[in-house]
Amino acid sequence: MKAQKGNLQLMKKINCSLILHMLLRNGSLSRAEIAQRSKLSATTVSTLVDELIQQNLIDEVGEKSSPGAGRKAIALEISRDKGYIIGISLGNNEFHSALLNFRNEIVYEFKSEVVRGKEAVLKFMVETINRLLESEIVKDPLQIKGIAISTPGVINDTGEIIFKSTLLRIDNLEIKRLLRREFDYPVIVVNDTKAAAYAEYFVGNVRSESLFFLSMDTGIGMALVIDGKVHSGYGGLAGEIGHMLIDPYGQRCEDCGQIGCIAMVLTEPAILEHAQLLAKQRKLERIPLTFDELLERYEEGEALAEETISRVNYLLVHALSVFINFISPELVVLHGWIRDSDKFVGQLKKGLAEFPFPLPFDENRVVTATFGDKNFIIGASTLMLHKVFEDYF
């Protein structure tokens, strides 16, 4: 986002929003740092910051450390208690609901079991929003500035309809219209993996304008950030890679009918099923009962687990090599079960480093997701905060 010139009131609105965006992303900045990064004059920044302070949107939080002698700059941060975002993450394994403040910090949260079907999901969201509104944190319903929802599945371009979510058994749910009928708040709906990718881009530990985000748990999801923007593709279908074929000798997928699609190679249920099949074929006494058990045995070096997970690693290296050659992202961000195994991540990095890319692959380009399972809800909240800051004035 860059400073704009034009109509004075419009300029003020855009530049105030710019300052809030900068503080949201950086956490703490001085007036001088804002002026330097925004290319606005020091006088303009000072005037706008003073107004934002008067509106309780920005706080002065003390002196900011800086090299050299002289007067210390005053650090500025977004106020924590001006308002809240309701965030709901409809996950594959659980639903996560929270209140987030204007600093994108979770101040109240709870988790719920997954429900499936249009009516059940809608009922859950209405009841959850009411529960969050009735929490002790919210003193006045006007403190709520928006509702941000992340969900697996295909969302239309305007973020109003969940076209299809196989895991949640949803088809054509007009979620935005139905929630607006119940609540008088702005609503955004975003694909969960795209939300998580945006969280990594905007507030992640390693910042990059170009990243590839891969999520692997009971389902599979992929998202791209290109030049600082989430790439949705035609019909919002960018990243729907679950049924791409990568293992012609693999298991048959009940959903698509193909053999060896990504969903039947990288997801927890598929990996566990493959290990159990091998154990039974070899008449082994210890058949892994859960994916966590299998992963633990892999970490310990047990033969069956090593063979199973090393196969997954090999196939993942070759799948990632295709995406890396096509897109050449600066970062590859991994989320899901892979975050629980340093051993797997280390082997994956080694495999990519040894792959014959046109230029050597730097292992530091592979990182794990910053916020874990909170990536989805923080990503959706970040997108809503952008809208709130843009519409505030």
Image: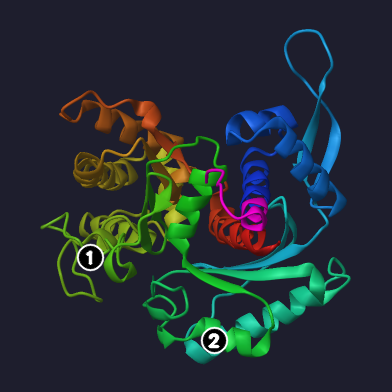
Task: Tell me the residue at 53%/91% (across/down).
Answer: 119
Relative to residue 170, is residue 50 drawn left or right? right
| Separation of marks 1 and 2 at Cα, in angstroms | 31 Å
Query: What's the magenta region?
Result: 1-13
Judge the density around disc 2: few (<14), some (14-19), many (≥20) Cα neighbours within 10 Å.
few
Q: Mark number for residue 367?
A: none
Residue 348 placement (x, y as % from top left): 32, 36
Q: Amino acid at mark 2?
A: Arg
Name the quarter where the C terminus is drawn.
Answer: bottom right
Q: Which residue is mark 1?
A: 243
Judge the density around disc 1: few (<14), some (14-19), many (≥20) Cα neighbours within 10 Å.
some
Image vertical order of residue 234 relative to residue 316, above or below? below
Is label 2 in a helix, a strand or a loop? helix
Display coloring: rainbow
When asked about the image quadrant of residue 221, the answer is: bottom left
Task: Tell me the residue at 46%/73% (across/down).
Answer: 159
Residue 84 placement (x, y as % from top left): 75, 63
In terms of depth relative to the viewer, which is nearer, 328 or 24?
Answer: 24
Q: Mark number for residue 177?
A: 2
Relative to residue 335, is residue 58 drawn left or right? right
* Label 1 or label 2, whichever comes before in sequence order: 2
Residue 198 visible, this angle: yes
364 in the magenta segment: no
Which numbered disc, 1 or 2, marks the residue closer to the eye?
A: 2
When asked about the image quadrant of residue 111, the answer is: bottom right
In terms of depth relative to the viewer, which is nearer, 147 or 246?
Answer: 147
